[in-house]
Image (cartoon, rainbow, N blue to C red):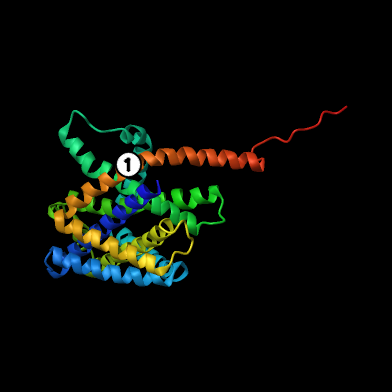
Amino acid sequence: MDIFAVIATVIGIATTLGFGAVQINGGLSYLLNVPSSILIQLIIIIAVTVLFMMSAWSGLSKGIKILSNANMILAALLFMAIFIMGPTLFILNLFTNTIGTYIENLPAMSFRIAPLNAEIREWINDWTIFYWAWWISWSPFVGIFIARVSRGRSIREFIFTVLLIPSFIGFLWFSAFGGTAIYLEHNGIDTISTLATEETLFGVLSNYPLGNVASILAMILVGVFFITSADSGTFVLGMMSTNGSMTPPNRIKLIWGILLSAIAIALLYSGGLQALQNTMIIAALPFSIIMLFMTISFLKAIHKEARELGIGKIPHQKKKR
């Protein structure tokens, strides 16, 4: 299981580095006419690797913490800019409507594979199943890393701060940026859908004041997000490959960082985005089965601990004589 977890984590982070390089390359191409090529993406990956290794070398309390806090501030600024300058009322209406639709259709959509409609099935494969695979491959390192920094918290606190709050922020984020793109398309600006996937965000931002400034901010945001992801990923890979050490040696993290970047470059060179997607799905499949056993083990561990601590039991009262 440890080996499968390491493989899934390596593939997950490496493909994310590849996507990050393509996204940043798309921004440079849209703003500065920098060619979108494997050479530019190679340079971006090397630059990101140097930065996240510097961060990983400084440890949890410095590198990751400082970058994560800075990134949240940048994300909040970009969100507020698009929320205020964009179609605010439309964003709020879309947020409210889609929350209801999400709750109503979640069970059916969780099992939807559209066996009789090839077009819909292709969309599900390229988006829904791919994102499931992406998060499955990330689950070992995300779970371990969040558990590591959440030591001492209760399960209730963990669920509230790790699942509920980020989900709510995600709903707002997609309503703002996705809603703004939809609003522009519905109001005659139909060039956004013609852009490459990695350029769409910058195409949306260009329709508002200080669009170039916002696009530069977005590229920095994407870059720092991938730096912190790779940083925490090398930390967890160091833990998993040193018998669970809570403070893995820097040389181990350095080795993992180089390997992650090398795999990302190899995948981009061999087949671009499609190679990244296919590799992600292949890596996630075996670990999805392991996750089922992990869930069962987690529930057994909770019940065992509850019995040992006497949680949930009604104290036995002696009968009055």
Residue beneath disc 1: 286
Q: Is residue 50 left or right of residue 146?
A: left
Q: Secondary structure at mark 1?
A: helix
Q: Please name the residue shown 24% across and 62% down the image.
A: 262
Left or right, 244 with respect to 118, comes to right
Q: Residue 244, position in %: x, y? A: 47, 56
Q: Nearer the viewer, residue 115 or 57?
A: 57
Image quadrant where residue 106 sits: top left
Residue at the image position 28 percent from the left and 68 percent from the top: 48
Q: Is residue 219 above or below residue 285?
A: below
What residue is rendered at 40% in x and 71% in y?
Answer: 57
Among the 4 quarters of the image, the one containing residue 20: bottom left
Q: Indicate whether 181 appears above or below 206.
A: above
> Which amino acid type corresponds to the residue marked 1 in the rendered image?
Pro
Q: Is residue 78 visible?
A: no
Choose top left, top right, bottom left or bottom right for residue 220.
bottom left
Q: Is residue 285 visible to us here?
A: yes
Mark 1 burial class by Cα count in 10 Å: few <14, some 14-19, many 20+: some
**Residue nearest the observer in this picture, 196 or 284:** 284
Q: Is residue 309 above or below residue 258?
A: above
Can you say which quadrant of the picture contains the N terminus?
A: top left
* The C terminus - image quarter: top right
Q: How many marks?
A: 1
Give the image location of residue 135, x and y in percent: 34, 48
